[in-house]
Image: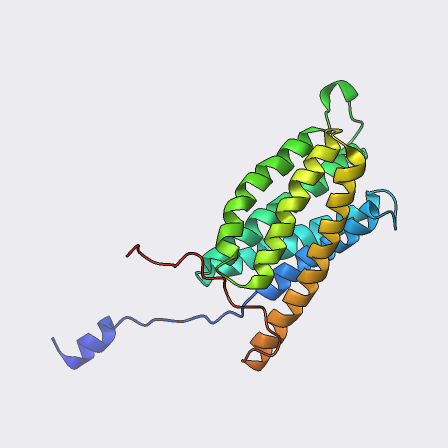
Amino acid sequence: MTAQTQAALAVTETKIIMSDPTALGVFGLSMVTFVAASQKMGWTTGSTFLVPWALLLGSVAQIWASTIDFKKNNYFGSIVLGAYGLFWAAVAMHWAISQGWLGAVDPAKADARQLAYACLGYFFFSLFIMVAAFEVNKMFAIMLVLINILLPSLALSILGVNPPLFSALAAWSELLISLLGFYTAGALFLNSYFGRTLIPLGKPFGFIRKGPAL
């Protein structure tokens, strides 16, 4: 085989470098939980104007970040951001339907308590995510602990189980998620931009070692 033939058969690889989208995904989560918490805390009322924030920041931003993380082989970010992005898309749809955006709702065929079971389903999965989050960094770990307080609290309050207690738990946990999320998103952005740890996120707890068992 001549050198000219070898050159013709050579495989050319093109590497596409993509920026880390995690800061955007976490910012989207922070924004939607902050706006939603304002309603739960009693600072605002109604859910009509929550829909855009749930749809665009809670859903689109996180799902878009998830798709980039899939391409970057970031397993944690792709699954977590994708899962919670889909959650907020469904919540936005739930609110829109309940307000008649898609037409009149027949009360005999609509039971808003189904959202409670969706929250419980996400709570079950979030327990597994929390285990992994403990081995990412401390800020993600704390946020997942709070998410696992928020989701069952929301479910129980929707089902009418001690609403004063569980509504308050849901409100405060959601507010704390948003505030910690702003810090985390900001830290991820600046650390990535400057190429060093400018704002700490806390080292992993080290409870479970990644890789094959010894």
**x and y percent of residue 22 in the render?**
57, 63
Q: Is residue 190 left or right of residue 97?
A: left
Check the image and report above or below for 204 versus 94: below
Residue at 64 percent across and 65 percent down: it is: 184
Relative image position of residue 212 (x, y in whole percent): 31, 56
Query: Is 198 rendered above or below residue 44?
Result: below
The residue closer to the viewer here, 204 or 155, is 204
- Report which quarter residue 154 is drawn in: top right
Can you give x and y, in whole percent of width and height, for residue 27 in the image? 67, 61
From the image, which quarter does the C terminus lie in? bottom left
User: Which quadrant of the view contains residue 4?
Assistant: bottom left
What's the colour scheme? rainbow
Residue at x 65%, y 45% (from the top left corner)? 149
**Frontmost residue, 118 versus 60:** 118
Q: Residue at x 70, y 49 (%)?
A: 55
**Relative to 117, is 128 above or below?**
below
Picture quarter with the N terminus: bottom left
Whether residue 40 sits left or right of residue 118 in the image: it is right
Q: Nearer the viewer, residue 74 or 184?
A: 184
Instruction: Find residue 46 and report its horizontal and vertical position in percent.
Output: 86, 42
Q: Is residue 131 left or right of residue 5?
A: right
